[in-house]
Image (cartoon, rainbow, N blue to C red):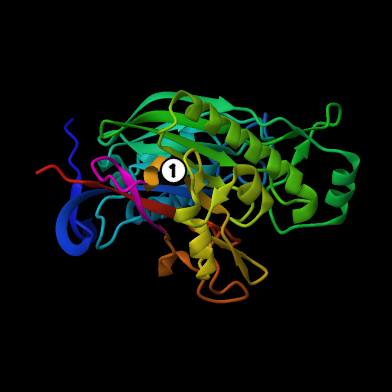
Amino acid sequence: MKNKSLYISIAILLFISSSFSQEKKTYAVNTIAFYNLENLFDTINDPNINDEDFIYTPENYKDKLQKLERVISQLGTGTDQKNSPVVLGVAEVENRQVLEDLCKQPILAAKGYAVIHFDSPDKRGIDTGFLYQKGHFQPTSYKNYALIVTEDETDKKAKDKVKVEDTDDNVVDIKTKRIYTRDQILMTGLLEGEEMHFIVSHWPSRRGGEKRSSPLREAAAALNKKIIDSLQIINPNAKIFTMGDLNDGPFNKSVKQVLGAKGDEKEVQPLGLYNPAEKLMNKGIGTLAYRDSWDFFDQIIISEPLLRKDYSTWRYWKAGVYNAPFMIQQTGQYKGYALRNGALGPGYSDHFPSYIYLIKEAKK
């Protein structure tokens, strides 16, 4: 199938002979995104995981899939871009089948979405994965990396003492003290002929309190950085996207210090990482709210080569959060929050998805 990029005209300023001139060029655009699907479970009780509280009725399962289809099909679209994400990282899915069912929804099926997924050891049964449009992206390899972390006694005391309004628990093996959490998935492939690397992860939760649980997310960030480093050893110019529900914001230690992600493009050195979420959060934009405070857990962080100003190949353009009115709670205690699952049935998600645009000069 021949790829058909969507084109737009963008006015850009070019430096020519130490003077400024404005030239109008034509660019192709693609969207990369991440979305926490909030407990996308099926209708079957799996005896191997703790899914009893999250099983959907057939009616609610159908409703949930239709709601997610609506969001994904519109995610990243607008005046600048007509297509939904060509690569979408996802979190809080029970298994591969729920992603397959999501891809079978009519609008998504018409776009040719396919699935990359691995089962994680998370005791609640939630995994991460990718959806991608086969007409634009072709995976060449994919692998999962286990995050091995343990709980010490201070963690246990904090967990018992501090309660958080979140169903995502850090389940501990009584004998080994290992905390069973999500794997990190690396998917490499060709985005319209150009090699790209995508990492999706869902870092350990804040159960027990943000400060007490921070070492768990710092360990997740260290694993993430190890994967990135391994790619950059092979190719220092590798175009890498690491995305996920990090359960930390762009200013937390795990992101700022362990990953070393910068919020200013000018500060990003070769082999460095840029985090667009930092500027968005400084503008008051977030992906989830807790106790009337917004944070930005759902981040897409990119490697330095995507910032270079040679638009003959895919480059970063801009970032955003998709929070259409239909995805927002309109009444009650949580007015203004993301419209999550509730007693009356499925919502969309308790997180808003984030996205970035890539652009490339179109061939004439």
Residue 126 belongs to the span the image colors magenta: no
Q: Is residue 105 visible?
A: yes
Above or below, 260 against 294 in this view is above
Check disc 1: other Cα within 10 Å, few if <14, some if 14-19, many if 20+: many
Disc 1 marks which residue?
304
Q: Position of residue 171 (x, y in %)?
A: 76, 39
Q: Is residue 58 visible?
A: no
Q: Is residue 98 left or right of residue 10?
A: right
Q: Secondary structure at mark 1?
A: helix
Residue 271 spot, x, y in % from top left:
49, 38
Left or right of residue 198, residue 261 in this image = right
| Amino acid on which the number 1 mark rests in the picture | Glu
Which residues, given as a range, are shown in magenta? 308-319
Picture mark count: 1
The image shows residue 215, relative to residue 178, as above or below, that is: below
Percent x, y of residue 232: 48, 30
**Residue 93 vs residue 272, the one in the foreground:** 272
Give the percent coordinates (x, y) of residue 34: 46, 48
